Image (cartoon, rainbow, N blue to C red):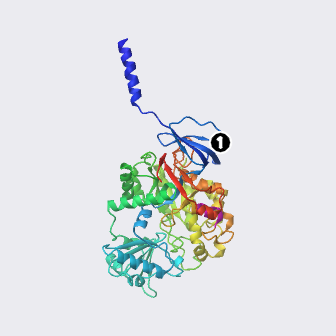
Amino acid sequence: MIRTAFRAVAALAAFASVPAMADTLVDNVDGVTIGEDGEVVRFTGLVFDDDGKVVQILQRGEERPQTDYGIDGRGRVMLPGMIDAHVHVMGIGFGALLLDLSDTNSLEEALAKIKAFAEENPGRPWILGRGWNQEKWGLGRFPTVEELDAVVSDRPVWLQRVDGHAAWANTMAMERAGVTAANADPSGGRIIRKPGSREPAGVFVDAAEELVAKVVPAPRPEDRDAALAKAQEILLDNGITAVADMGTSIEDWQTFRRAGDAGKLGIRIMSYATDADTMDLIAGPGPTPWLYDDKLRMGGIKLYLDGALGSRGATLKEPYSDEPQTRGLPLLTPAQLRNIMSRAAMDGFQTAIHAIGDAANSDVLRAIEELSETYEGDRRWRIEHAQVVDPAELEEFGEHGVIASMQPLHQTSDRLMAEARLGPDRLDGAYAWRSVLKVGGILAFGSDAPVEPADAFAGFAVAISRTDADGQPFGGWLPDETVSREAALKAFTADAAFAGFADGKFGRLIPGEQADFLFVDRDPLLASPSDIRSTQILEVWVGGKRMR
């Protein structure tokens, strides 16, 4: 009897030593989410547990449970955390820490900014930056080495174009790299040359970038840690709680892991490796498990099939309207594409394939059709950008549940350039969001940051209006391709999570998923496009913890 009593006391003591689970009720909210059935659900209260997962959502008039903690939402709009389905995380951070030319509106303005940056940073051995855009400048050509030399000639300069598919070098950078007139264009790349000669003119497109990039000093681990911290700051400030990182290198992955180990990984990252070898090195025989409470996972590979429209690297079925001698730069052969996709699929990895031109998109759709016969099951084949698709092939997005990972802000930035590159008769199937949904495809929206700002609400406004920040063009560009507000919300939350095999983990405010949510000052399902662009992020919560 004494032994029995002792056991009972010991059991009670052990039970008492386990901390009680404490739920938190966030009440008096104007809540909006995508429900389990894919439809919009409105609610007025939400309960999450100590693990940061949603336990219950509550409707108006529904009895409130007794919880340990309570938060008054003060009637504010609560949304799921935004998910950006296509970013370059480290590029966001480095772009903010290095020279940023994305806000320049002319060559002269860019050159002045480059000169000032060099003068303000005399100790930097290289001047590195990104963001220039000759189309935005209205230049009608690429910038030249002479123009860059005129402002910085004492150090090498290497500046990536806004889309990352071209870069601009000064003479000293080309000398360091040993690039001369004798260099041939590499496969999948082009050296822009001076008129009437083979002398490099200073701009290197797609695969040709590596000719100079190989001699650019690599960032140190502490530089990478600082860049990741800056990227997270930018993303969280914009209400983005999760991203798909397109092109994760081993160095990037180790940076993410250092942050996770130190408890400093505030956003959720769905990683897609730069190449098959990196995928295998990081993940081994299959996708990694979710790490750090659903903060990080390597689940696939990012492939580049062509370049960008801006640098005329996107591959087209017919020649460029404004440069009839080219159809773009294919970066993989059809055989290479299928071999890499097959290698990934055999081990259960997802493939996300950059395809911008109609020829590239056609090749990806053909490859998906062929490989779907061998690799059955839930593959969630992704096409990144899918900017120009042959209208006759749009239906194929619905045949194998293809995910179109698209970036609404590209449409407004590219509109005039796309018209020049394609001509007026080839715009059907360009940035065709509604058409993808109509045939049964899935939209996952993102920004491609740092190519475009990591601004989901600006993207939302474009998705429903096809107009830019100035409301142009009136009535929208190809307005038949707008999507509904509900579809835009879904593409920036639930379907962006689904696109990265994160459904059930986060993306919706429903029981069992992570309590990643925002308080904002307006309801995007009711506000005008211009008002949506002005949305103020009031609070940001990730896994039940306030981050902003």
Q: Which residues are magenta?
A: 459-466
Residue 387: image quadrant is bottom right
- In the image, 146 versus 540, the foreground residue is 540
Judged left or right of residue 350, residue 76 is right
Q: Which residue is mark 1?
A: 60
Residue 461 located within the stretch drawn in magenta: yes
Query: What residue appears at the point 47 percent right and 82 percent down from the top-left corner?
Result: 108
Density class for disc 1 (Cα within 10 Å; few <14, some 14-19, many ≥20) is few
In the foreground, 20 or 286: 20
Amino acid at dot 1: Arg
**Residue 416 horizontal side relative to residue 250, left or right:** right
Identify which residue, 508 or 109, lies in the foreground: 109
Residue 171 image point, x, y percent: 36, 81
Work out whether 267 lies above or below 310: above
Q: Position of residue 275 (x, y in %)?
A: 42, 59
In the figure, 28 relative to 217: above or below?
above
